[in-house]
Amino acid sequence: GKKLFFCSSVERARKVTALLDWMELIALRPNSKIRPTTESYRIALSAWAWSRHVDAPKEAERILFKMIRANEGSRMLSDNEVRVIPETKDFNTVINCCAFARGVGTNAEEWADDEVLEQQLRELEATYVVAEGAFEALLSSPCAQPDSATFRGMMRACVNLLPNNEERDARVVELFQMAYKTPAQRENMNLSSNMRNPPGGGYVDNNILRQLRYALPSPKEYIRVREEYEEFRKKNTASEE
């Protein structure tokens, strides 16, 4: 049943992507009224993200950057024409697709083989590069900004895709620092109290703090990083008052 579901999900993702490619091709014709919309790209992104296929991260990355290029091209359209506008959730879809890719297409017996293990580790690191690419594209995007889910997804990608070493821990800490040093947008103020980020702490919320604790194996390191965050938050809150 599960295998049949994955096959049907992949087939659906391929069909949606083929339709998107066709729409882009038709849109190149003079006076064409057929043109992909933001939702067209978003449906294809989600289809691959939910497919759980080994190629899902690369396919999702390809669609995201097609979406970005479509946005760049649609800036020349008139006000009454539909523009393609990638949002934060679209970048997050690619990041999370990568973060949950560990183990896709493999089984426990294959991981016991050293040669296969090395190959799998290389593929996981390649998948992390895809996540980093989406993250960097979001940071430079004129249409969207990272949010709590972005940083949480990147921290999860580090844990799931990178070798368990000091370099990985350093990247997790760097992402956490970026999360609390990035000023949160005002939309955060409208959230319920249990979802709202603490004042002065950027995009750090309870979910990011839990992810940090899970990501750092050393309690001593976690406490050090957490204390730095609390100190920054207090100073930042005082300067805002």
Image (cartoon, rainbow, N blue to C red):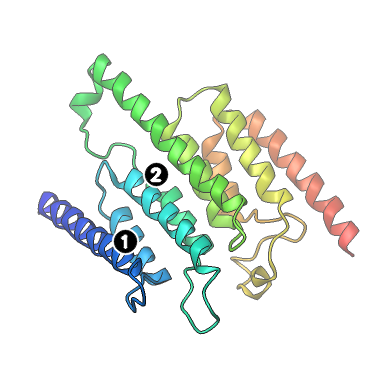
Quadrant where the C terminus is found in the figure: bottom right
**How far is disc 1 from disc 2 in space, using C-alphas?**
16 Å
Q: Which residue is mark 1?
A: 44
Residue closest to the eye, 115 or 239: 115
Rendered position, 172 above or below 42: above
N-term mark: 1 or 2: 1
**Residue at image point 71% right, 53% down:** 182
Rendered position, 19 above or below 217: below
Amino acid type, mark 1: Ala
Q: Position of residue 32 (x, y in %)?
A: 33, 76
Q: Secondary structure at mark 1?
A: helix
Q: Secondary structure at mark 2?
A: helix
Q: Which mark is residue 228?
A: none
Q: Position of residue 93 (x, y in %)?
A: 42, 56
Q: Which residue is mark 2?
A: 98
Amino acid type, mark 2: Cys
